[in-house]
Image (cartoon, helix red, strand yellow):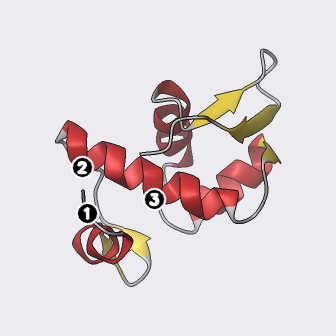
Amino acid sequence: MMKQTEIYQKYFKEGRLVTIPKKEKAKLQLFAYFQEALAEQGQTFTEKEINDFFHRYYDDTAILRRYLVDYGFLKRDSYGRTYTIGERNG
């Protein structure tokens, strides 16, 4: 598994995500990277807070938000208002 610094060097340029990897293993590593960075800021977030977080890294915040929910790195309440850190961890 890639270390955080390797993920950052491979997929980021000047602090921004260049591309979402196509390979499943690389996606999981990237999503775990984001999950860890989010967890440093808390456990529960509004959609706006999630979007603000992702916008620092990538313009399409919705795709990153959806990926992290779909892969279990984030959980969303049934109303789509509250997000919590998922149990998946890499």
Q: How many marks?
A: 3
Q: Amino acid at mark 1?
A: Met
Q: Amino acid at mark 3?
A: Tyr
Q: Which one is in front, 66 or 86?
A: 86
Quadrant assignment, res 5: bottom left
- Dot label at residue 2: 1
Viewer-side label of 3, 1: 1
> Which residue is located at x 16 percent, y 41 percent?
23
Q: Does the CB distance between marks 3 and 2 fall below 8 Å?
A: no
Pointer 2: what residue?
26
Closer to the chain start, of discs 3 and 2, is: 2
For the residue labelled by badge 1, is the local secondary structure a helix, a strand or a loop? loop
The vertical placement of 47 against 6, above or below, is: above
Quadrant assignment, res 69: top right
Pointer 3: what residue?
33
Residue sitting farthest toward the bottom: 14
Q: CA distance from mark 3 to mark 2?
A: 11 Å
> Which residue is located at x 42 percent, y 72 percent?
16
Q: Which one is in front, 86 or 81?
A: 86
The vertical placement of 73 against 78, above or below, is: below
